[in-house]
Image (cartoon, helix red, strand yellow):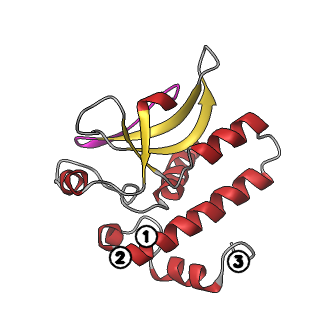
Amino acid sequence: MEGILSPAELAELKARPIGVPEWRNLTEEQIALRVEIGKKIQADFIATSPTLEPRLRDIYERYPMWGFYESAESEDAWPPRRAYGVCFGEDDDERLYTVTLMSMINNRTIGGCPVESLVRVDRWSPQTIQRMKSPLYNGTGIWEDPLGFVKLLMELHSQEDD
């Protein structure tokens, strides 16, 4: 990461590692900095991945992993989602691998979620944040932090190694 991130960005990650419980207490400035870090991490992934097809790169650019996503299909935008990958459906439609915040669990979408069913937002609404803070939901550090996708990917890969 040293060649990719600035000294200030590296200091931010050292002071507040990805996925720690303090994710709910990030300031707006810290969130903005962490979005910039997320953009650089994703750009490095796209630039260095030898097998990533151009059309997959395009989906990552339009639907970044550092983004926050809400449902386009419900009136209250619930449930919130985070993206951690892209794919194509059976009809060659664009999809995102997502995790959905649900009571007691974080649910991964198998086969991806159609991009039309999601709306990217800069930040969760105050109502969504209030619901997320309920003890019924498993925050695990992936929801409020723009870098939560890194923790999610690390968790998924550690499960594959088991």
Determine the secondary structure under disc 1: helix
* Residue at screen point 49% across, 57% down: 151
Q: Do the CB atoms of the residues marked 1 and 2 lie less than 8 Å apart?
A: yes
Callout 1: 10 Å neighbours few (<14), some, many (20+)? some
Q: Nearer the viewer, residue 56 or 2?
A: 56
- The answer for how far apart the CA atoms under marks 2 and 3 are is 24 Å
Q: Position of residue 76 (x, y in %)?
A: 23, 39
Q: Which residues are magenta?
A: 102-113
Q: Nearer the viewer, residue 66 or 14?
A: 66
* Quadrant of the image containing the N terminus: bottom right
* Residue at screen point 51% across, 65% down: 35
Q: Position of residue 13 (x, y in %)?
A: 52, 76
- The answer for how far apart the CA atoms under marks 1 and 2 are is 6 Å
Q: Position of residue 77 (x, y in %)?
A: 29, 39
Magenta span has 24?
no
Name above or below for residue 16 compared with residue 54: below
Q: Which residue is mark 3?
A: 2
Q: Which residue is mark 1?
A: 31
Query: Taking the image as drawn, is residue 114 in sight?
Result: no
- The amino acid at mark 3 is Glu
Q: Nearer the viewer, mark 2 or mark 3?
A: 2
Name above or below for residue 39 compared with residue 103: below
Q: Nearer the viewer, residue 118 or 50?
A: 118
Q: In this rendering, would 160 be left or right of 126?
A: right
**Mark before the other along the chain sequence, 2 or 3:** 3
* Residue at screen point 51% across, 29% down: 112
Determine the secondary structure under disc 3: loop
Callout 3: 10 Å neighbours few (<14), some, many (20+)? few
Q: Which residue is mark 2?
A: 27
